Image: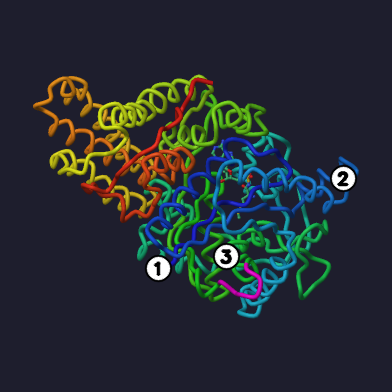
Amino acid sequence: MSFYVTTPIYYVNAAPHLGHAYSTIAADIMARHMRQRGQDVFFLTGTDEHGEPVALAAEREGLTSQELVDRNAPRFIDLMPRLNVSNDFFIRTSDAGHKAKAQEVLARVRDNGHVYEGVYEGWYCPRCADFKTDAEAGEDNLCPIHKTPLEREKEDNYFFRLSAFQDDLLKLFDEQPDFVMPRHRYNEARSFIESGLQDVSLTRSTFTWGVPVPWDDSHVFYVWFEALLNYYTALSYAKEGEDLTDRFWPAQYHIIGKDILKFHTVFWPAMLMAAGIPLPEHVFVHGFLLIGKDKMGKSAGNAIDPFTIMDEYGTDALRYYLMREVSFGHDGSVSLEGFRARYESELANELGNLASRTIAMVHRYRDGVVPDTALDAGLAAEIDGVTGEVREMLDRADLTAAGDAIWLRVRRLNRYVEEQAPWALAKDPARAGELDRVLASLAEGLRVIAVVLYPWMPESTGKLLAALGSPSVQLECARMQAGRLGAISKLEQLFPKP
Ligand code: MSP
């Protein structure tokens, strides 16, 4: 089975912040989990490099647009290994391979009769690279997102006949109720379609930084249409000498933030229909990371730098925090205080402590060898349940529920230690068999948790599994089995106080 998951491609003219890390980590967890299941996975992320905002920023800095994107793209390229993100390819929309394929697809949209020539007049926000409706512009003609003045633009455009796809889109939403997830976002997209679709500009002719329109070189494609195509074009050139399109298209999941819903759930499927390309299975729309009540972002100037947190606490802690703190699909506040609190209470005191005391007790009471004995059946059933739950939850991208299901088991094992009190059993030689069973059950439980938790925290769980002498992270290993572990090594503290 193949599994193709994507993140949005990031605008290069801003520094990466926690919001960008969030989309990317979520997609990484899904990619890693599907690899654990033995699926053939392709995971794509990248940068969105064309459009007027980039051209304007370059002009301000006295650079060419290409120089600006070449200077800025590495910030995002370098972020990926720092986040321990396992993307299979990093697309830049200035890649020759992307441009050629995008031109091919959009020419097909025109050949299929969905493009016409006209004049566009409307309110345009250069920072959004998007036209606004009169209702959005309001009386003051301000961008509803940036609160900056909109520009009245009039230009020759080629139009995409979006309005012709209204019925097909509604049919898609009827037939595939999980095309857009979660449900409240499906409803939002659907009512946007029901409210009536207007044709949209497919090209721009007032600047040149973009993919040239093959049938008219005085135009470049409107950046959004070309950028959306990245999900499709990447497969055609990501691997030298092999076109991966048949192997991975259509994508299973596009992970996106709620601000780009209209593009991904309305424009994108319509464009694919127009080109005769199969549609992706799901668009999962997550919420915003908030600082207090405000969206975190460069415009608000309140962005948290992911590098600072990672330098101090490590990458796993950041990955864990973002996924636990903010319910996936909803907005949620983040803060450095909240981060520190969760680090201490959950990572250090719950998981870290469970790991260190389990391993220490096997060393202290059994010379570092996990006893080969029957496990506690009740506990095993509780722990084993997690694997199926996580599978099923991640099939529907419910990262929050999956994280909760795993953490329930971390807490269960800690309770088990308290209930069984191995230190008391160790004092009574007649209860050696019981102690064997408790230690073996704990060590196995810890191993199973490390396997299911691996996509969230690949580094720490890797260390833990190595110490347990059982490095495999295949999901089929996430089952309690007596005699699975033998001699184990020592473990450094997983989540030290910084
Ligand atoms: N370039 C477009 C996407 C094109 S996809 C074909 C874009 N780029 S972006 O850099 O502005 O944003 C990329 C993603 O980061 C979006 O999904 C956006 O929702 C997400 N985030 C940016 N700030 C965010 C938060 N404060 N919280 C969570 N995610 C947010 O849009």
Q: Is mark 1 within 8 Å of ligand 1?
A: no
Marks 2 and 1 in Cβ contact (< 8 Å): no
| SS at mark 3 in the image | helix
| SS at mark 2 in the image | helix
Magenta highlight on residue 463: no
Identified by mark 2, the residue type is Glu
Which residue position holds label 1? 1
Identified by mark 3, the residue type is Leu
Label 2: few (<14), some (14–19) or many (≥20) C-alpha neighbours in 10 Å: few
Question: In front here: 209 or 233?
Answer: 233
Magenta highlight on residue 243: yes
Q: Position of residue 480 (x, y in %)?
A: 23, 46
Magenta stretch, main secondary structure class: loop
Cα separation, mark 1 vs mark 3, equals 33 Å
Name which of mark 2 and mark 1 comes first in the sequence: 1
Tell me which colouring the rendered structure shows: rainbow
Q: Which mark is residue 59?
A: 2
Dividing the image into 4 quarters, which one contains the C terminus? Answer: top right
Residue in the image at 27% along x and 41% along y: 444
| SS at mark 1 in the image | loop
Q: Position of residue 136 (x, y in %)?
A: 60, 43
Which residue position holds label 3? 162
Question: In front here: 463 or 486?
Answer: 486
Q: Position of residue 390 (x, y in %)?
A: 32, 48
Region rendered in magenta: 239-244
Q: Is mark 3 within 8 Å of ligand 1?
A: no
Residue in the image at 82% along x and 54% along y: 66
Label 3: few (<14), some (14–19) or many (≥20) C-alpha neighbours in 10 Å: some
Quadrant assignment, res 449: top left
Q: Quadrant of ligand 1?
A: top right
Label 1: few (<14), some (14–19) or many (≥20) C-alpha neighbours in 10 Å: few
Of labels 2 and 3, the one closer to you: 2
